Amino acid sequence: MPIRTAQEYVDSLRGRKLKVYLFGELVAEPVDHPVIRPSINAVAETYRLAEEEPELASAQSALSKQRVNRFLHVTESADDVVMQNRMQRRLGQRTGTCFQRCVGMDAINALYSTTFDIDQAHATRYHERLRDFIEFVQTENFVVGGAMTDVKGDRSKAPHEQADPDLFVRVVERRDDGVVIRGAKAHQTGCINSHWLLVMPTMRLGAADKDYAISVAVPVDQPGITYIYGRQSCDSRALEAGAIDQGNAQFGGQEALIVLDDVFVPRSHIFMDGETEFAASLVERFTAYHRRSYVCKTGLGDVLIGAAATIADYNGASKASHVKDKLVEMAHLNETIYGAGIAASHESKRTSAGNYQCDDMLANVCKHNVTRFPYELSRIAQDLAGGLMVTLPSDQEFESKVTGPILRKYLATRPDVSVDNRRRVLRLIENMTLGRNAVGYLTESMHGAGSPQAQRIQIQRLMNLEEKKRMAKKLAGVDETGEPPKT
Amino acid sequence: MPIRTAQEYVDSLRGRKLKVYLFGELVAEPVDHPVIRPSINAVAETYRLAEEEPELASAQSALSKQRVNRFLHVTESADDVVMQNRMQRRLGQRTGTCFQRCVGMDAINALYSTTFDIDQAHATRYHERLRDFIEFVQTENFVVGGAMTDVKGDRSKAPHEQADPDLFVRVVERRDDGVVIRGAKAHQTGCINSHWLLVMPTMRLGAADKDYAISVAVPVDQPGITYIYGRQSCDSRALEAGAIDQGNAQFGGQEALIVLDDVFVPRSHIFMDGETEFAASLVERFTAYHRRSYVCKTGLGDVLIGAAATIADYNGASKASHVKDKLVEMAHLNETIYGAGIAASHESKRTSAGNYQCDDMLANVCKHNVTRFPYELSRIAQDLAGGLMVTLPSDQEFESKVTGPILRKYLATRPDVSVDNRRRVLRLIENMTLGRNAVGYLTESMHGAGSPQAQRIQIQRLMNLEEKKRMAKKLAGVDETGEPPKT
Amino acid sequence: MPIRTAQEYVDSLRGRKLKVYLFGELVAEPVDHPVIRPSINAVAETYRLAEEEPELASAQSALSKQRVNRFLHVTESADDVVMQNRMQRRLGQRTGTCFQRCVGMDAINALYSTTFDIDQAHATRYHERLRDFIEFVQTENFVVGGAMTDVKGDRSKAPHEQADPDLFVRVVERRDDGVVIRGAKAHQTGCINSHWLLVMPTMRLGAADKDYAISVAVPVDQPGITYIYGRQSCDSRALEAGAIDQGNAQFGGQEALIVLDDVFVPRSHIFMDGETEFAASLVERFTAYHRRSYVCKTGLGDVLIGAAATIADYNGASKASHVKDKLVEMAHLNETIYGAGIAASHESKRTSAGNYQCDDMLANVCKHNVTRFPYELSRIAQDLAGGLMVTLPSDQEFESKVTGPILRKYLATRPDVSVDNRRRVLRLIENMTLGRNAVGYLTESMHGAGSPQAQRIQIQRLMNLEEKKRMAKKLAGVDETGEPPKT
Amino acid sequence: MPIRTAQEYVDSLRGRKLKVYLFGELVAEPVDHPVIRPSINAVAETYRLAEEEPELASAQSALSKQRVNRFLHVTESADDVVMQNRMQRRLGQRTGTCFQRCVGMDAINALYSTTFDIDQAHATRYHERLRDFIEFVQTENFVVGGAMTDVKGDRSKAPHEQADPDLFVRVVERRDDGVVIRGAKAHQTGCINSHWLLVMPTMRLGAADKDYAISVAVPVDQPGITYIYGRQSCDSRALEAGAIDQGNAQFGGQEALIVLDDVFVPRSHIFMDGETEFAASLVERFTAYHRRSYVCKTGLGDVLIGAAATIADYNGASKASHVKDKLVEMAHLNETIYGAGIAASHESKRTSAGNYQCDDMLANVCKHNVTRFPYELSRIAQDLAGGLMVTLPSDQEFESKVTGPILRKYLATRPDVSVDNRRRVLRLIENMTLGRNAVGYLTESMHGAGSPQAQRIQIQRLMNLEEKKRMAKKLAGVDETGEPPKT
């Protein structure tokens, strides 16, 4: 029976016997682990939004002829691509963190057109298989995670040149009924909270990398898979008594290392196997989608602006002109990100396969601004928060009969402002600028979907410099037709 | 007979007996004045583009049932608004300057919905009159300029409070057949190159400013109008022999002070008269359109990037990594402007009147970036140009038999690069960053459609801070329901 | 017997029976508390440096006629002020954190001239008392902390107007032999690691705030004082087994709330009592010194640049031009801070009391850059670090027999780079940009010695705008002498 | 008889029969040419300042045993280096432009130590000759210009590899009594306004470039020298009637191409001839001095801030919080430049020759900020100026009986503000941000003393990255001693 609600989603994750390691120990049940649970709540919010605002977070699928969660939808128009951004911003606002489903959504759409192109070139059947798979997950309403980033070993060497051939995920055995793969994928967002993973190659491949040109779907609980949980700033506050010091106790992100130790994949779930020349376009299409998916961070930006405005209220500073001006600057930067992202989506074009692909240049520009502006928003938020954000005693101190009353006496500001509310907001700003969700709001804004230099290289490719030179030369009256220039 | 070509447009401007003053003298025929002509050429390019790329620069009008120049088109879809931006960028690329028709286009569209709203409120007939006027100019294919910015006198006082009541344009006489207006409009882009002017109030008005709530159409050559030409940096180079030192000899912008000395306007051309409460929304709609129209500057940005890349080629520096990186940064900033602008257009909504109005927040964000990034593009372009840009001797020196050969000997770089081409490109960069077109690319990017603070105020209004606070408080677990906070 | 070594300093802190609360509990012995100890180590480094580089970290005192730790030295020349900066940068390099002694050093010097001025005005004896106190601490080689920042309550009200009069530290009883004070000081750097505290008013006071114009010295272990420890990002990692995840296990900062619950101060240790009109100049002199003391952050900047360069090496990316360029940018920003700071010190002027006071404008400019550039250095460091910095599993995972070998296999890069060294450097960058020392490197760079707006107000006061207008008017040929301007 | 006053200086330039070409014509008398004269006035101001503030602009020379103009002084202490900066800022404030004497001052000091070092290495007599020359110019009180920047031809080739060997200045003939040199120096600041030129090589040279390792002094009016004047933005406004449109009618900068067509130099004026290995250190010392000399631009910054504040006054906007904040930002950036520059001077070290050399890192940091901040100050100044700055009609219009009264009616603001004063200030801002002095304030701030990338390369050399890595590794606990890392 398909998953229908946020609660059913959470229930669906129980009892899967995943091999998840965290703080050196095998986790008995991830759903109940206090460090992991907030990340599950964040994914659950994608279901809840689909219940509460179906126009926003679900779509009618021509593929499976039913209304499906938008994260599983193959885009059928530019407007579908735009709606992804609207949904992403809304979820950022609701969770204040990474809700982890964009990789899968973007992978589905990138594979959709790439499998079509491979089939055209090689008379293969990948596209049909993928459509079947998508129809299946749409019907079951599963979470599909993407698994792209290999651990990469020595960055100066190709996959097949590595000292250890497993440093990129590869086919180690080909059987009649399928393939066996081995390797590891790093920084995998939300993988433990998914039902299926779409494995894809991580970069342009050469002919000698044939065994690395592999794309498959695997169930998250497939034997042979181990998950090693990445630790985040302040993660262990979730293990403490009291929720306030977490800042955002309910929601968090998740990244883990996925180790694939000889995992079998049946033929029906293979979407690329050896077509090295299509690795680059798969990656390029995926990153184009995904760089614009970082519009989600404007939802987090909305929360941070709100938090900064609230703390200014509590501090009695909200009427100061410099405070108002800083909030405007935050909004301006946040909307600048949004503008480029949603523009990339609006400018989507139909692919040969029939789904819609966003504008590559604007997607890169969006992401490149994401590698800059959230840091500046954080800086301003810390400015407005005041120093107390990082010198506030622990929640236990406020609960203590000895120090609690002292703190409530001395941290009082205006009579209508609760000290506890004040520290709740301070802890939220700490959470987003230094703590657990700073990981997502800052560092992953930097590196997710490619580090800044990757965007610059792509902008360079797309900027059409020769055309721009031609324009300039025409206006300048440059004459390069001449025989040996007498100058 | 309607104007059909760029040449016919130029011809249509001849013999109009305008009272235009420049350098202290009445200009005999603006079309033939070397300082003015480049600005006419820039407007002519809007006709040429409509000839060469009709899909881009013209549109089928439901109003006049014919294909019309896009600058005269009432938007019938969000896509129509988007197409304006595409056309604007293209014209920026073709001219490297301000082509002066956006004010009129945006005024037509802002008045279209505002007159509709006034009629709804007051049972007036403005909308029908305006439709008639638009149909007329579409049919004749005229250039319509906008005239909004009053000279304003003492900024701390309302129009009716000024020492001299003429410091805002006002009705000085009401007659059965129309009104007589007096006042002046400053910084009027392309006014002399237009056929008609749409006069509009410049800001929010109070009930006591009734005589200032006036919007009309007047022919540019109406008796009683005087034009005093604004001087631009390096304008007088157009009076020198030789074209190279102008940088962009063919195209330039134009701003003038329009003095309305008791100009009569018949009833049929009055679109607002006394409805002070609609001044604010007219201005707001106009500025929303117009702030996003600054996407034109990305066309200029394309030219400047091309010029910077060309001079790097000529200097033999184009392979240096820092040079490539600077060009990427220029492109990134330029596309960031474009992203916000075109997003504002894509997000247009239908008005009650039926035309489409762009997104206000994104339009403001676009313009606000325009007050920053072209300055940074200019700075980088000057970096890539090298110091010679400002120490290059005059064209006369290169033409001189004495100094010409010396300069050609000593300013030689690579044997395949012409010294003259090198200085052409240097002069183009000078033109756009210090000279005549720097006026449009920089200073008017700063102040056109409202100075930076105007955008910040609008962003503040639109940023929905209370909603953002609510989001933050929810995630922080703030509880403000409590009775007297025990803290 | 005076303290002579770092070890003797640490020993001197033992057994003092301080009332320190951390995580809701009374700390038995701060010296042995794993969260507190790194902050003690950082202070100890100020002793170690004096041993190892006496020219840098000690000075010959004319006051006590002996060589004293530079943190206790009354400046006798501009060069003495400069040497403070050199020492600060060096200690920043050695500890990568806040070494906590600058507040005391700057307080001693600010009080030195202020007490002299009060005595001149009021025929009091504060200056002599202060000299005695300084001679005493120089001889004993004690750590003197400063205690300035009151908790402030409702920011819109003066001290005497607060609902609770204790929200600023005040005299609650005057006795023949001294005074009794009550209140609390927030964000007090290194207070627990000090031997004495110099209490000072926090801001400009009015005549009605007489009881708040109090400056005294109190021993840290005086009865009636309670310390409530501020928690820092990732502080509890110090409680975990394994040192690597701390990033910088040896050194950390410290801030606590000091609660003064009716603390008696004998007459000999009172340096201001009721002279409200000198509160402003005391604060201004202190902040001038202290804003330039933030040159210490360039020492942390050096460490962060080094860490970023090291991780680039380990990732095999150090030859990429964009990597080199980012390191240069980091150095440029870091040295820009240093330039303004050391310039402020070089430009010191002799006070009436005979010590040297730094330049106020340049000190403010230095600090204002400190509120910006460390954030940008952090952003670039995170760029160079790569995403692994925030997805790296915990140290326990690397120690585990199950997951340790898997991680070492898959996180290998080049054969000559140790995975453990790689994560050590990643954890150091995390420590400085998100973790425990990010508190000092970022948030306290923002708010310490005054938040950004405080510097802007001071720059506004000092910028001498009238003089600048005069210069401009002269060059522009402005003539304002005229009688009623006819224009 | 030595020059004693500004007037005597101007007189000393008359009748020299220089071959100066401007606008294609040989200039009869540069002193009387309206385009050239403002640049002479700027140099004259260096004499006037020495008269009015001798402590600031002159110094007692140990070399010539007399009080000499500071521009001719060999630094005898760090304080002497600092005083150069104070004088430079003051002259920037007095002229609002480049006063052209820093190159000579910095060249004298760089050659002073370099000739000493060459003599040590080669037993030559250059240092003594240079001392004689300096004593001579000190006594005569002459202006000494520097001539360093060669035209350089193909940037990818060394001097001796160029197609035309004259593209770097070189010795074409060696005679018993001296040498004959040929070539050209580009962008030579103030050369025509000097009495003597110090010719120096422009960059690091190889052994094969022996003929290019030449440094000499030549009189400006030596036969064989031709000067071709560089044109500046808006230069021809100086040829118009009326002074207001010039913005700063009195002062301007000057750059020219110096063509050396077989110029003879006697032995006594040769300071380097063939010692190629010293070219690099001469250039490096000179640029270190000269990059910090750009502190002069903070004097221009003061003027621009003053102009921006004045126009805000005139517009009635000076109390708006955003206006005040923008002025503070301008001051902050301006003082940041000053801080790094004066710090470089304060940190000067004694050379082997006995004069003082500034800190290289801080000098580069100063200049690098000069390539950024004046552009931002200009942007803000244009923001505060308003759009009228670039749409203001010409001075002739204001003088016209027809348009003058109209303009004075419509450009009136507050009754106490003169329209003419308003446009004077607007024209000054135009002058500094787009016009004649924008050349010096912006573009030459970018390229003078080396383009931005030159500073970055030097910062990279000086940043001591290995030391920083060592610091980071120590704090991170990195252990690289291990044998083959088991990781």
Image (cartoon, coloured by chain):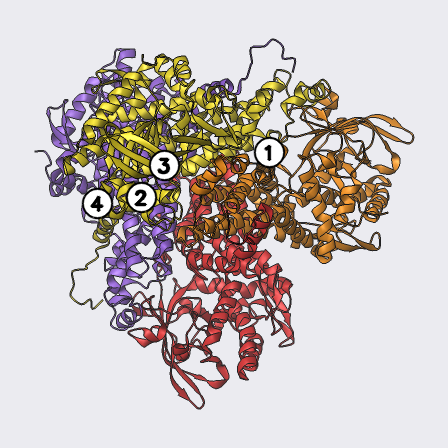
Chain colours: A red, B orange, C purple, D yellow
* Residue D449 badge: 3
From the image, state whether disc 1 or disc 3 is nearer to you: 1
From the image, state whether disc 1 or disc 4 is nearer to you: 1
From the image, state whether disc 2 or disc 1 is nearer to you: 1
- Label 3 – label 2 distance at C-alpha: 14 Å
Q: Secondary structure at mark 4?
A: helix
- Label 3 – label 4 distance at C-alpha: 35 Å
Pointer 4: what residue? C94
Amino acid type assigned to the residue bearing label 2 in the image: Ile
In this view, the residue in front, D461 or A119, is: D461
* Residue B237 badge: 1
From the image, state whether disc 3 or disc 2 is nearer to you: 3
From the image, state whether disc 4 or disc 2 is nearer to you: 2
Q: Are marks 2 and 1 in contact (CB under 8 Å)?
A: no
- Label 1 – label 3 distance at C-alpha: 30 Å
Amino acid type assigned to the residue bearing label 1 in the image: Arg
